[in-house]
Amino acid sequence: MSTYFLTWRDRFERIRANKIFEAVVIAIIIVSALLIGAKTYEETSRFHYWLLALDMAVTVFFLVEIVIRMAAEKRLRDFFKQGWNVFDFLIVTASLIPMGESDMVLLARLLRIFRVLRLVSMIPELRMLMAALVKSIPRMGYVALLMFIIFYIYAAIGSFLFAGVDDYLWGNIAVSMLTLFRIATFEDWTDVMYATQEDFAWSWLYYLTFIFLTAFIFLNMMIGIVLDVMQKESMAIELESGEGEAAEIQGLRGDVRELHEQVTRLENLLIQQNGDPSSRRPTDES
């Protein structure tokens, strides 16, 4: 075949990398989400067949789109090496469950809801946010454990002290933890504090220290963890795409390393040609 003619794989690869094609896929995902929302209104029941036809058209489009992306790979198994590709494949194949069968209609509708998540796989910025969220969960787990300890201590203290004031809010440690969660989210927490202040005037100190620990310190710690992971993910994406400050720094490091290797090779070459100066012995002067 002449080099001027593209193979089918090259054509599929160009279609996959085309920005217009990506924009169309994103638009269809949004349309799919709107169709799911429209079906929750009773007024749209008279358009049931039209909505069903649109849903079938969207499903066929997603099927064609995933086939194009798979055909654009040099090897089919390369497509499944990326987690987001596997996710898209599962969502698209799950959407093939027919809507007409009464036993499967609920499952089919639930699976179609997850097609909205395909926006994450299509938009790099959303992928970065999702990856940062997933990778920050283990580190946030230790902060959450420390928060649970603080909640437990304050709940026990509140249950011992304030149970006589309001048994509904402070009757036991479990209810007290729910009350503290309400306080941590600032949901009418002042009403709870004023109720206990009638019997314990100093109880404001209990609430302020709890809010200071949970709402300010621990929350900022979690935000800091997420921001740190997001920064690392952003640098990884820049290195992968070859764009951005991180990619420039990596390129400069590569250039410096290459220059260092060239200088080392030149030094070795000069030593081989002239001999090792350090091994020479001074000749005796006559």
Image (cartoon, grey):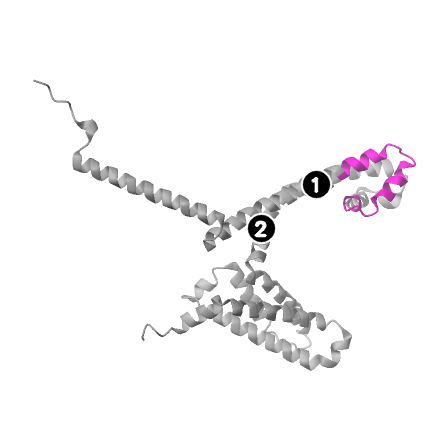
Amino acid on which the number 1 mark rests in the picture: Met
Circle 1 residue: 147
Bounds of the magenta span? 182-211
78 vs 98, left or right, is: left
Question: Is 101 inside the magenta-drawn segment?
Answer: no
Say if mark 2 contacts mark 1, CB within 8 Å.
no
Q: Secondary structure at mark 2?
A: helix
Give above or below for 7 relative to 150.
below
What x and y, as percent, mark residue 114? 63, 65
208 vs 269, left or right, is: right
> Which residue is at the front of the view, 86 or 118?
118
Residue for point 61% across, 43% down: 225
What x and y, as percent, mark residue 257? 36, 42
Amino acid on which the number 2 mark rests in the picture: Ala
Quick one: quadrant of the C terminus?
top left
Outermost right residue: 198
Question: Is 201 inside the magenta-drawn segment?
Answer: yes
97 vs 152, left or right, is: left
Residue for point 54% across, 67% down: 22
Mark number, residue 132: 2
What x and y, as percent, mark residue 9? 41, 71
